[in-house]
């Protein structure tokens, strides 16, 4: 796994947790074209081979901003064609992150505006620092969310709340985000990474094939009718019955010891 990127800093925590940190604090981690390309590379790499990674933490450098959205200085003066070419890169970056086979936990360390808020929404779930703020500001710039914001936000907070957030472009607090369902947990800023890592490690200690199957099944359930979702769940469940990890999990329970899952 490549670890040296221009706009991201990657760090392994223990054997199975990977921190993916946006690393442009001088511009509040605003996403430029390079960041989009590197996001594609990172998450497509994990799709091809997780190399032992069982959970990803996605965060931003600094204590002020998770991500300010698209880099408007880079975009200033872009032709329509250039803008659309860049956006296609961002589209691929969102899909690559969404298709990551292992859980992606957002650790929102500050402002998450525009595409930054959409990035948080693309994570499987989110912890946020108490001072973090969120907003989808695209309509104030003559555009609209274009990184799955109008898909992921209603799933998180409901249709009516999502329409209010998108149409006003107004910011809201981490606690409001938690109350509405966008954020799972609000942490004190100095405890954010500690608590997120603890959860990531808890996930990583569970059976990795089970986690992947459960993630996929839960995602599918929000896109299809209940009986179709249940058929997918049953297929995934039955594939796990014949795994070594299933045998290990039951044996460990009966022997009153910690299971040693190998992902097989």
Image (tube, helix red, strand yellow):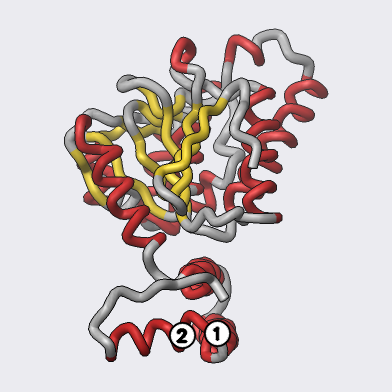
The relative height of residue 162 versus residue 28 in the rendered view (above or below) is below
What residue occupies the far left of the structure in this picture?
188
Instruction: Say above or below: 213 vs 14.
Output: below
Q: What residue is rendered at 32% in x and 31% in y? A: 109
In this rendering, the answer to whether 180 lies above or below 146 is below
**Residue 90 visible in this rendered orientation of the protein:** yes
Q: Relative to the observer, which residue lies in front, 237 or 229?
A: 237
Task: Identify the residue at horizontal 22%, vertical 43% (top origin).
Answer: 186
Q: Which mark is residue 246?
A: 2
Residue 185 image position (x, y, % from top left): 24, 49
The residue pinned by badge 1 equals: 243
Q: Could you tell me if the residues under marks 2 and 1 are in contact, i.e. CB atoms within 8 Å?
A: yes
Q: Number of numbered discs present?
A: 2
- Residue 255: % across, % down: 27, 87
| Disc 2 to disc 1, C-alpha distance | 5 Å
The residue under the point 66% across, 35% down is 90
State left or right for residue 30 relative to residue 60: right
Q: Which is nearer the eye, 241 or 254?
A: 254
Secondary structure beneath label 1: loop
The quarter in which the C terminus is drawn is bottom right
- Residue lying at the far right in this picture: please name it: 81
Give residue 236's quadrant in the image. bottom right
Q: Split into 4 quadrants, where in the image is the N terminus?
A: top right
**Which one is nearer the viewer's eye here, 222 or 251?**
251
Using the rendered image of the protein, determine whether residue 218 is visible from the camera's viewpoint. no
| Direction from residue 184 to residue 37 in the image, left or right | right
Q: Residue at x 47, y 41 (%)?
A: 12
């Amino acid at each position: 796994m490549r670890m040296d990127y221009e706009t991201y800093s990657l760090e392994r925590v223990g054997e199975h947790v990977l921190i993916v940190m946006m690393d442009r604090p001088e511009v509040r981690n605003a996403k430029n074209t390079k960041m989009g390309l590197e996001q594609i590379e990172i998450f497509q790499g994990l799709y091809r081979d997780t190399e032992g990674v069982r959970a990803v933490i996605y965060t931003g450098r600094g204590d002020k901003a998770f991500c300010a959205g698209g880099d408007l200085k880079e975009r200033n003066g872009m032709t329509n064609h250039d803008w659309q070419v860049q956006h296609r890169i961002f589209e691929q970056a969102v899909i690559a992150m969404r298709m990551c086979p292992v859980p992606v936990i957002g650790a929102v360390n500050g402002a998450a505006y525009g595409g930054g808020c959409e990035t948080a929404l693309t994570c499987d779930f989110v912890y946020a620092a108490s001072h973090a703020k969120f907003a989808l500001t695209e309509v104030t710039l003559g555009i609209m969310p274009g990184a799955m914001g109008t898909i992921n936000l209603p799933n998180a907070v409901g249709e009516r709340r999502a329409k209010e957030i998108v149409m006003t472009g107004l910011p809201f607090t981490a606690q409001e985000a938690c109350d509405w369902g966008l954020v799972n947990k609000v942490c004190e800023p100095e405890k954010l990474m500690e608590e997120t890592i603890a959860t990531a490690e808890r996930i990583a200690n569970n059976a990795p094939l089970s986690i992947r199957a459960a993630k996929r099944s839960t995602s599918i359930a929000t896109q299809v009718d209940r009986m179709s979702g249940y058929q997918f769940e049953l297929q995934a469940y039955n594939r796990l019955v014949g795994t070594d990890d299933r045998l290990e999990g039951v044996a460990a329970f009966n022997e009153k010891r910690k299971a040693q899952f190998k992902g097989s």
